[in-house]
Each structure stands twice: as structure tokens, then as C-alpha cells.
Image (cartoon, grey):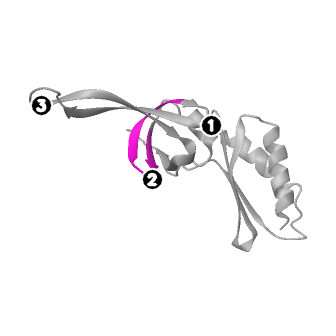
Amino acid sequence: MNKELVEQLITDALGENSPLFLISLEFLVDNKISIIIDGDEGVPLNECIRLSRAVESELDREEEDFSLEVSSPDVTKPLIVFRQFKKNIGRTLSVKTAEEKIEGKLVEVIGDDIILNWSAREPKPIGKGKVTVQKSATIPYNSIIEAKVKLIF
């Protein structure tokens, strides 16, 4: 399988719709090609079909048989590309770094940092009991080990 050709075909097809971007491209056993794309405002099914056709039409099954799968990311999988954070502003994320694990609402993406806000119960400064306080954390993207969107029903 000509991997460079497939990569170029995907790049060209994604260039036709700038809100879309590549999450992963895998060449698996038995010539299976797995492409995962995302978009700033989601991925319509017709865009998966268009991308699949754009790649498949340029590859010759007579020369080398293959299977092709184009999909959008699974909501239970971690965020992989920094651009995915921007599209998830307003959602609750579970973010793991080397030092800690934080769960909070993604409120902003600035430069290479994400900002999470959450509420926490802490002991009162004076007296017994607890008080609810608002917390915030600025996390550099390069320190994130794993980040997942928390599904809330």
C-alpha cells in the first residue's frame, strides 16, 4: 500500500472542507486503512462518504486489494488533537496530567493552554462545615497525558 499517496489524498480531500481535520490514519493488517476525521462543528455523514470516495477512487483494487473505513471519533475515546479542545468548549472534561487528575468545564483555549473551571467543597476558613468554592486551572497542552469528554446524562 502506498502510504504517501493515501496521506496526500486525505490531505487534498480535507482541504476542500476546512472545518474538517485528521485525527488518525492507520494502516492495519490485511491492507485495512482506518481514517478518523473530526470537524470544528462535528462531522456530517456525507463528509465521511466524500472522503472515502476521494481516497478510494484514486487507489486501484486490481493492483492491491484493501478495505477502507472513514469515521468520526468515538465519544468515549480521549481527545488526541489540540483542535478537538476548541470544539469542546463548554463541555466537562476529565484531564489527567503527571501531577493530578482534574474534572471541570472547559471554558477557554488560549494559545497552547486549556482552562478548566469547577466547584469544590472545602472546609470553612473559620468554624465547622464546608463551603462551595469555584476553582480554575490553566493546563498546558503538552502536559496533558489524557483528556476525555465526560458524558453527562
Helix, strand or loop for disc 1: loop
Q: Are marks 2 and 1 in contact (CB under 8 Å)?
A: no
Mark with earlier residue (3, 2) = 2
Q: Are marks 3 and 1 in contact (CB under 8 Å)?
A: no
Question: Is the stretch drawn in magenta largely helix, strand or loop?
Answer: strand
Q: Label 2, label 1: how many angstroms apart (C-alpha)?
A: 30 Å
Helix, strand or loop for disc 2: loop
Residue 75 in sight here:
no
Residue 56 in sight here:
yes
Quarter placement of the N terminus: bottom right
Residue beneath the point at 22% across and 33% down: 122
Using residue 86 as the reference point, say whether residue 91 is left or right of it. Answer: left
Residue 67 location, x and y as percent? 75, 64
- Residue that numbered label 2 is attached to: 98
Q: Is residue 96 magenta?
A: yes
- Residue that numbered label 3 is attached to: 129
Q: Callout 1: 10 Å neighbours few (<14), some, many (20+)?
A: few
Residue beneath the point at 63% across and 47% down: 72
Using the image, tell me which numbered label, if any, was put on residue 42: 1
What amino acid type should be assigned to the residue bearing mark 1?
Answer: Gly
Residue beneath the point at 58% across and 30% down: 110
Q: Is residue 112 magenta?
A: no
